[in-house]
Amino acid sequence: MQNFIKKTILITSALFIPLGLYAQDEDCSQNPSELPAQVHELIGSLRAISNAQFKKVMDLKVNMDGSGSLAVHYENGKPTHLRLSYKNKGGEMNQVLSFDDIAKGKEIAYEHPDMKGKAIIVKARKPFESDGRFKFEVKLRSKIGPDQYNAHSIDLAAHPEKQVVLKDEKMFKQMVISPGVKMFSWDGTFKSVEFN
């Protein structure tokens, strides 16, 4: 999660530093100590605009931990990016991956900082796109050392006006995951998942 945040800050900085430099050329009397607050405000505004461009596909809930969502960004009626958002008491994470990268084998994965290995993996099934649907595999870690996973196939019928996710040809709007618990804390695995 920290690597993703660092990448987001780096990309955001690369995009908006030239804007800040242009603003300084225009008004040389600007106090440099004011710039970080202004940049922070600008990033917040642009993030809100960017978030509005994503259409929520489904809700995600991890019992006893937090919640989030899966959303799709469209350009000219075609899905271009997938975003996984998740929030718990430890903070908030957002991972964005293009459909092109997913088709090439890249995956969205969650790895807890205190537990090695990927706990949740979302990746493409083959063929990735078929009959207007995008096919995904969600893998939830069921055992640690060596890691073993339970895989679940879901389909996304992505249309800008209506997003539909299906599991075994049945539509669902929420995925609820139950974590494995040992001694009142998460053991790094998931014991069950429901598609509601």
Image: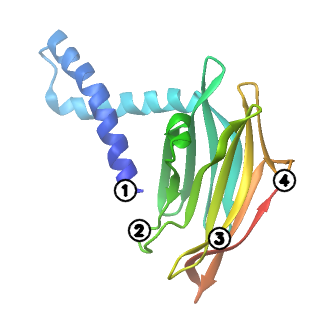
Query: What x and y, as percent, mark residue 78?
Result: 64, 24
Give 37 or 196, whichever is nearer the viewer: 196
So how many labels did they put on this image? 4
Question: Which of marks 2 and 1 precedes in the sequence?
Answer: 1
What percent of the width, then of the height, locates residue 171? 85, 46
Q: Nearer the viewer, mark 2 or mark 4?
A: 4
Count residues near mark 3 (Cα–Cα under 10 Å), then give few for <14, some for 14-19, many for 20+: few
Residue 83: percent from the left, percent from the top?
56, 42
Q: Which residue is mark 4?
A: 168
What distance separates the C-alpha of mark 1 from that of mark 2?
Answer: 9 Å
| Label 1: few (<14), some (14–19) or many (≥20) C-alpha neighbours in 10 Å | few
- The amino acid type found where label 1 is placed reads Gln
Circle nearer the N terminus (2, 4): 2
Cα separation, mark 3 vs mark 4, equals 27 Å
Quadrant of res 192:
bottom right
Tag 1 or tag 3, which sits nearer the N-term? 1
Quickly name the residue at label 1.
Answer: 2
Report the amino acid beneath label 2.
Answer: Pro
Amino acid on which disc 4 is placed: Asp
Q: Residue at x 51, y 47 (%)?
A: 105
Label 4 vs label 1: CA separation?
A: 35 Å
Indicate which disc, 3 or 4, sits on the residue closer to the N terminus.
3
Instruction: Return the disc, 4 or 1, that comes first in the chain's sequence.
Output: 1
Per the image, the residue denoted by label 3 is: 64
Which secondary structure lies at badge 1? helix
Marks 1 and 3: in contact by CB < 8 Å? no
The correct choice, above or below, for 139 with respect to 100 in the image is below
